[in-house]
Amino acid sequence: MHICFLSQEFPLNGALHGGIGSFLLTFSSALIKRGNKVTVIGINGKIFHDTIQDGVRVVTFPKSNAKLIGWWRNFARIEKFINELHENQPIDIIEGSELTLAFLNRNPKLKYVIRLHGGHHFFAEGENRKVNTWKGFQEKRSFSKADGFIAVSEYVKMHTAKFLSYHNKPVEVINYPIALEKFYPADPTKVKPNSLVFAGTICEKKGIRQLIQALPIVAESIPDIHLEVFGRDWHFPDGKSYVEFLKEKFTKEELKRVTFHGPVSHSQLPGYYEQAEICVFPSHMETQGLVAPEAMAMEKPVIFSNTGPGPETIDHGINGWLCNPKDPKDIASVILEALSQKENFYKIGKEARKKVLGKFETGLITDRNLEFYRKIKNS
């Protein structure tokens, strides 16, 4: 099959990337190994790129900033390229995220799939903010053009359906694949005692502020507790750094227990997870999130959120722990509970990897996606 992804987030060699980039990298590689063809098309930057990376063709068009019609020009470029590509290398499936199909004219010869990575309606509900009228309109229009939908968790499927119609088209829950060769079983001898590791964008919705607030409570019982933070900084609309906001909010004494390392590449993460006593990800809301299952794949003790897809990912006390991400006291309580069970870390780590193998293993996930693609293609 020839699968075409509409995204500007495919990570070229050496580029830092987020969750969708990690998904595209892992999934595209798996598709190619099974003999499929993959093209990724996006709008980003100021220069046209057309390159092949590990068998994946990545085409990026410069973004038009023309007043009022820039958005139309961007969609027109993609649409023209898709139609020309299909004539020379027939495309079986076009896949994008929630907004992607809004102003793309459907080619009747092609089939279109939306993967629910977390759209505007979903996060508006999760973050308790109003739906932007323009973005909401785009999502509804986009959904009306899809032939099928893939949700990366049961939670995102259910909560998206509260606001948007699937128009009686096929919908299937298929989790993200985890690159198990990259996230290997960790060496316990490399652990730094009483060290916590957080990875993700440094912003409010990832729960980093409440995690830092939890540290003094934990320190009452474990004075040498320390948090290592890895991830890119987020900025407020006025340009202010969220890391600087945290440094202003907390005292120097409180921040002695925290080290901000800045952004790191996806390939570096396993080495940092390996050194953690516990990996802690108290995100306020996720569609699924990759950091928790990636750390679980390394047989690490993981604390994730009891909201969203957290209960789908971790069985509390069996293969990890769940906390209330908005309550520093609960986060501290769960950290202390976990650290009181160090003798069980080996068993819990093995159960964590077992959960990932059964739920996120790349081969299993790739097969399920291909089966769904064939179903849509033949519908």
Image (tube, rainbow, N blue to C red):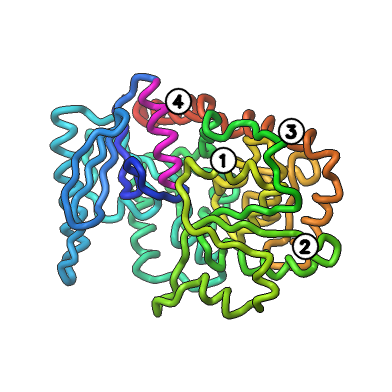
- Residue at 36 percent of width and 25 percent of height: 32
Residue type for callout 4: Glu
The tag earlier along the polypeptide, 3 or 4, is 3
- What residue range appears in magenta? 20-33
Residue type for callout 1: Pro
Q: CA distance from mark 2 to mark 4?
A: 43 Å
Which percent across, then down, holds residue 109?
22, 33
In depth, the one of 155 and 16 nearer the eye is 16
State the count of labels: 4
Q: CA distance from mark 1 to mark 4?
A: 31 Å
Q: Nearer the viewer, mark 1 or mark 3?
A: 1
List the residue tagged with mark 3: 351
Decide if residue 169 is on the left or right side of residue 41.
Answer: right
Which percent across, then down, holds residue 128?
56, 70
Q: CA distance from mark 2 to mark 3?
A: 23 Å
The mark found on residue 303 in the picture is none
Residue type for callout 3: Glu
List the residue tagged with mark 2: 332
Q: Residues within 10 Å of mark 3 (few under 14, many from 20)?
A: many
List the residue tagged with mark 4: 371
Q: Residues within 10 Å of mark 2 (few under 14, many from 20)?
A: many
